[in-house]
Image (cartoon, rainbow, N blue to C red):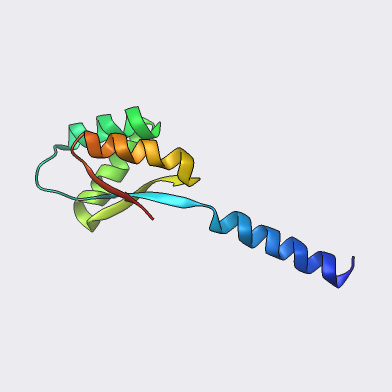
């Protein structure tokens, strides 16, 4: 394998990794655990167990990444979370 091809493959991998964004959910004093869990199941396609774990992490750590992917997929999901009164952003 040529050096040029190996470098190009490394660049391609780095470009793929940098296209991944995250929806981060933040803790608040308003929403119940049930509301957060139901929202994550509905909007982020979490299993019940995943949603419960994220809700616990958000509560105790202040935030949690709840979904990763391309920006175009995450934007409508983030908007839905915000519409449900949750505090979230894409990073």
Number of labels in the image equals 0
Pick the residue in front: 74 or 24: 74
- Give how far across and how far down residue 38 sits, in percent: 26, 29
- Give how far across and how far down residue 11 sits, in percent: 69, 64
Residue 43 position by quadrant: top left
Q: Note whether 1 is above or below 39 in the view shown.
A: below
Residue 31 position by quadrant: top left
- Give how far across and how far down residue 17 sits, in percent: 57, 57
Quadrant including the C terminus: bottom left
Instruction: Give the farthest residue toward the left.
Output: 29
In the rendered image, is residue 50 in sight?
A: no
Q: Note whether 71 is above or below 63 in the view shown.
A: above
Residue at figure coordinates x 41%, y 50% from the top left: 22
In the rendered image, is residue 34 in sight?
A: yes
Q: Note whether 12 is above or below 42 in the view shown.
A: below
Say whether residue 32 is left or right of residue 81.
Answer: left
Quadrant including the N terminus: bottom right
Say whether residue 23 is left or right of residue 62.
Answer: right
Say whether residue 40 is left or right of residue 86.
Answer: right
Instruction: Give the farthest residue toward the right.
Output: 1
Residue at figure coordinates x 33%, y 41% from the top left: 78
Say whether residue 27 is left or right of residue 88.
Answer: left
Residue at figure coordinates x 27%, y 54% from the top left: 63
- Give how far across and how far down residue 36 sits, in percent: 23, 36
């Amino acid at each position: 394998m040529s050096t040029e091809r190996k470098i190009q493959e490394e660049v391609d991998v780095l470009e793929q990794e940098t296209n991944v964004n995250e929806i981060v959910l933040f803790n608040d004093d308003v929403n119940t655990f049930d509301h957060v869990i139901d929202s994550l199941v509905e909007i982020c396609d979490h299993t019940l167990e995943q949603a419960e774990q994220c809700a616990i992490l958000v509560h105790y750590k202040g935030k949690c990444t709840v979904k990763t992917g391309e920006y175009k997929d995450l934007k409508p999901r983030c908007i839905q979370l915000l519409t449900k009164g949750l505090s979230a952003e894409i990073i």
